Image (cartoon, rainbow, N blue to C red):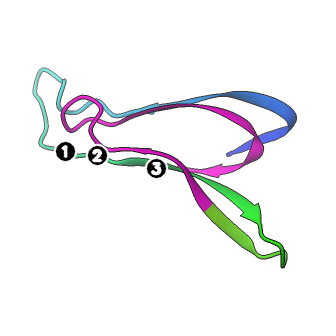
Amino acid sequence: FQVPAGRSGVFTAETVAERMMNSSDLDTHITLLQEYLDEQGRRRVRVIASNDDYFSNDSFLKVELTAGLYHV
């Protein structure tokens, strides 16, 4: 997804598997990447945030973002 130039916002992502009434053995891992151009103009990605055990095996991210192209 893309945050337009001059804009900002808050991104949240969460998995809810182990906290369900019929819980799951799912062990999630969420990673947020930002795409950018390096000095030679090549596309690169960097890790902005990552989480794998917010609530037992469920993952959660909440990150303030500025303009850019992001991948989950």
Look at the picture and state if 61 lies above or below 68: above
Residue type, numbered disc 1: Leu
SS of the residue under disc 3: strand
* Residue 41: mark: none
Residue type, numbered disc 3: Thr
Locate residue 59: give its quadrant: top left
* Residue 26: mark: 1
Q: Position of residue 30 (x, y in %)?
A: 41, 46
- Magenta range: 46-72
Residue under label 2, please give it: 28
Q: Position of residue 72 (x, y in %)?
A: 52, 49
Seen in the image, is 5 located left or right of residue 70?
A: right
Residue under label 3, please give it: 31
Tell me which numbered mark, 3 or 1, is placed earlier along the sequence.
1
SS of the residue under disc 1: loop
Assess whether mark 3 and mark 2 are in contact (beta carbons under 8 angstroms): no
